[in-house]
Image (tube, coloured by chain):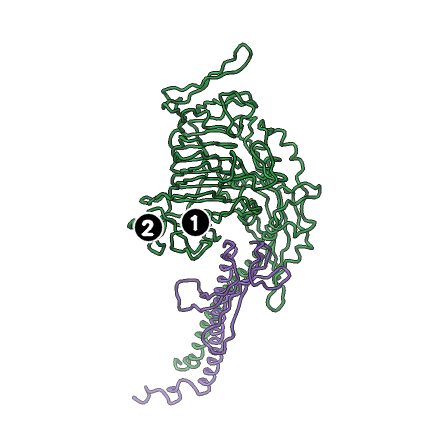
Chain colours: A green, B purple
Amino acid sequence: MKQQKRRGSVLFTSLILLTIAAVGVMGLVRYITSAQQAAIRDRDYFTAFYAAESGVERVVDYFNNPTNYTGSVPDAYDDFKSHPAAFASSAPFAPQSYEVFQPYVVSYLLDSDGALVYGANNQPVILSETYFRDPNAGDAEAVSRTSKIPTIQFDMDEVEGIQFFSDNGEEVAWVNSILFENPNDLADLAAITANNRLVIGKVTATGTTRKGLTVKVESIITENNASNFRSPAAILSEQAIAFNGQFNVQWGEIWCNQVNIDLPTNWQQSVPKYGPTFRLASGNNDTEDPWFGMRTEKYIVNSKGQYANGITVTTDRRGRLSWTYQFTNNPPLAGTKNFTRPFFDPIVDDYKNFYQNQDLDWPEYDWEEWRNFVKEYGFPYYYTDENGNIYGTDRDPDSSTYGQIVSKTYDQWFNAQDPSDPDYWKLENIIVFIDGVPQNDAGETSTVINSEFYPRDPSAPGTIRPTIQLAGGGLHTRGVMLISPNMKMTGQGNTGVTGDEIPVEAGGGFRMPNNTVYADADDVNVFHNGLMYSWGSLDLGGNRTIYGSVFAEQGYGQGGSPSVWYNARMRDGAWINLNLSRVRRDLWNISKD
Amino acid sequence: MMHRNLPSRRSRWGLSLVEILITMAIVSIAALGTISALIFAIRTDADFKQRNGAFRQATSTLETTKKALFGSLQPRSFPVVVDSRGNLDASDDVMGTATLQYFSMDGSELASLPTNRQLVRARVTVTWTPPGTNSARPQSVFVESLLAP
């Protein structure tokens, strides 16, 4: 019987084994198939995602090239006319550039040629606006950052043109919808506005694939305002700001951090509000500059080392005001906001403008980010050796200067241009970057940059900071000067200048401090129009006039009588146009619809 | 006595020829089917993983392009590694080519990115040839998005 039961057992066993193997293979095939399906879904998802992304990019292009979308430009925000009255200046002229002063608007919508774009009611289209410090409000800073673009539901007929096809002409995905909204009610905008970025709006775009998968992308659109180049004051330093010469400041403030602001002898005349005729002691209050101020996180001291500590105001029998500045041997109370306001402000009938012992909102600069930015965009890039010589690089406009000491006549290598050239005002903003000394990890120096020797971040310990000396005639540049070493300038800064004349573009010409408008550019002159920043110290010999801001981390030298006219647009970086995209994408969210 | 304890001639054989033939036939058919399915699955899986690796390269290149600054966005082709498994094991890697192209909105290919920041179509195509057979045809995947530089 046993033998008979064995008959057919091989077949049976084989079938069992085959069944087990088949089940295993089927499981493997099923696993592979499911993995493939997941991968297909992933690819489908990304295809839909990039279609939705295309909707957002389409909106970015709308702001960069508004005139390409005839009929799409939204109505302008037309109640800005109510603002100038609230910000009336006592000064007899516009304290800022024409564009900023008139409606206190930072950003208009411009076409590709830089011309204003007008909405349906024939008013310029406003992207966003900023109200600068209101002199009427004393110490308060009335700042409003709001988008003025209304909700836009993009025309589907137009959007339907955004389709994506495979090589064989098969439609694989398309943009399904685009909606642009005013985002003022979104709670998550706090992080953006806290970083000083102006919010333009929120885009919601969907993309769909032929398999029916729809992905939604939401993205906040902010102004691409080069905020890394913002400067909150006319003259800044993390160290001392001393004025043995005449350091004139107009339309802006002086900020100091680490040490006291030292007032020179006869400081009332040495720190005029604007123009050479200003004399505080003369009581010529009608020419006060309400935008002027001095702020320090330490104290303001006079030439005797005494602390500014209040003011005494008296009225004589005829009702005329007079005042006495109080300086004490002891500093104002620590830990409290002790302001001393020796300047009379006729607008608010009060004294203002000197602030000490207070926290200041310093701009956050990133040298490494700047370096990468300059290299990426091909702006002039130089470096120095330990003796202060300046070397060209392959980013130099004249590439033959690579590794060679370049001329110190800065008209040549700063891409500067004679301001009498009629096209001077059309000069594009540039960034001149002077990097530090190539050093290796051991601190040894070189005159060439290679994999071993490279300029360090100026804040790194052991960084050698030489002094570069520039001499010669006028330097006429627009944009940003980023300087790692100390810089000393000698010689006459401006040529052909009478007095402190400042080139502020105005309607029909160029506006002067005395409110005269010149039609021709060669009647005006300026040493530098923009931001001048040094990680070291600056010694601005010569009577150089700068429109913009000067920032010297290690303080200032004592040469010359520079005059700085602050450009208020620099408060948030919106002053510079580097041919970047006007807007940029900020926070975003992705979801399946 | 001894002979009675020996199995008969018929019982010693155990299996008939017919049984063996039928078994071999069934086993062969089933095994061939199973092995074919296995080979097909493995080969398809390898192709699929290569396609996935190529797609990852394409999306990565497109993302890099979207994040890149204006000056480094010109059309170009460059070699890429089509990594099937996305790990450090190079045994499954295949060399391929990524091609970045720009097209105007009307579909014409652009030799360079417009300097006036016009909206373009950016397409990244990754091509590769599967290894193993001389007659393998080149494969490709692409990803495309609008780009407002």
- Residue A342 is at least partly visible in this image: yes
Type of amino acid at the residue the image marks with label 2: Gln
| Image coords of residue A123 (percent x, y) | 68, 40
The first of marks 1 and 2 along the sequence is: 1
- Residue A587 is at least partly visible in this image: no
Name the chain under label 2: A
Residue marked by disc 1? A371
Q: Give residue A439's mark.
A: 2
| Image coords of residue B139 (percent x, y) | 52, 70
Q: What is the crowding at mark 2: few (fewer than 14 residues within 10 Å), some, or many (at least 20)? A: many
Question: Element at badge 1?
Answer: helix
Q: Closer to the camera, B12 or A61?
A: A61
Q: Are marks 1 and 2 on the same chain?
A: yes
Report the Cα–Cα distance between label 1 and label 2. Answer: 16 Å
Please, is residue B20 above or below residue A532 in the view?
A: below
Q: Residue at x 60, y 38 (%)?
A: A518
